[in-house]
Amino acid sequence: MVTAGAWDVPAAWATQLVSGGRLVVPLRIRGLTRCLTLGHTGEGHWSALSQDMCGFVRITGAGEHWEDMPYLNDTDGQRVGLRLEDGPDVDVQALRAALTQEPATAWSEALVAYDEATDAQDLWLATVIDDWALLTADPGAVKAGLVKPTWNHGTPALIAPDGASFAYRTLRRHPERKDRWQFGAIGHGPTGAATAERLCALMQEWDRDYRHGADLDITLVPAPTPDDRLPPGRVVDKWHTRMVLNWTNTP
């Protein structure tokens, strides 16, 4: 059992398992942490047998890894940033300018109950979005109205193809159904409105096709494995392994 948040799975951990043993590790997946129970299938391959949402302090030492985390607003107490783990290279100055522009808000048809867990949506979005990021915000930034994220420590965000716009997920009480909350997106920049609409469309796709009965297969293979020997899915390259994420819809 690994008791700190890891970014990768070194081969040495497999040598410490008996035959049929399991590795339980809080593993970062594009900035999100999930506690994975991994089975070792030989030849350096791992397969996730279960996953649970969790949060752990980062591992230190040789396995320590820090992603790019530029600030879009760096005013003390009102910081707004992007966590870009396994995400795109961004034009920070262009995105800083975008944050100062008038936001555009779009609302999806995806609804959620107050006490309903939706961490699977986060992971699905991280799997399907190429230009993926997590928006973070100080409480003071939210109070000042700079941003309205669903979670201050890391809300799903989408960087626009123009590199000068972005959108992030937001939430409001449904105007007609008081027992439900509604997912939406807030966009900033020249194509912020279109980017917000795109993020809403993705949340609706999750709601329609993956919210119920969908499973995420997580496989890790040795880093030298060529592309033509990988299973289908989103590939996240790490130091020691290549992680492959593949959603299967099983009604």
Image: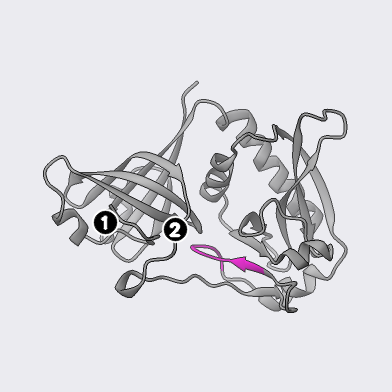
The disc at residue 225 is 1
Q: Which residues are magenta?
A: 81-88
In magenta segment, residue 62: no
Q: Which residue is mark 2?
A: 56
Residue at left offset 58%, top offset 29%:
209
Task: Check disc 1 and report its element: helix, strand or loop.
Answer: loop
Q: For the residue marked with disc 1, what is the amino acid?
A: Thr
Left or right side of 34 for 174: right
User: Which is more toward the observer, 90 or 155?
Assistant: 155
Q: The residue tagged with tag 2: helix, strand or loop?
A: loop
Name the kind of residue labelled 2 in the image.
Phe
Q: Determine whether label 2 and label 1 are within 8 Å by CB.
A: no
Left or right: where 24 falls relative to 172: left
Q: Is 89 placed above or below 53 here? A: below
Kindly identify the residue that appears in the image at 40 percent across and 41 percent down. 51
Closer to the camera: disc 2 or disc 1?
Answer: 2
Q: Position of residue 58 (x, y in %)?
A: 42, 65
Q: Is residue 93 above or below residue 82?
A: below
Crowding near pointer 1: few (<14 within 10 Å), some, many (20+)? few
Q: Is residue 251 above or below residue 91?
A: above
Q: CA distance from mark 2 to mark 1?
A: 29 Å
Residue 171 position, x and y percent, is 75, 45
In the visual, does 12 lie left or right of 157?
A: left
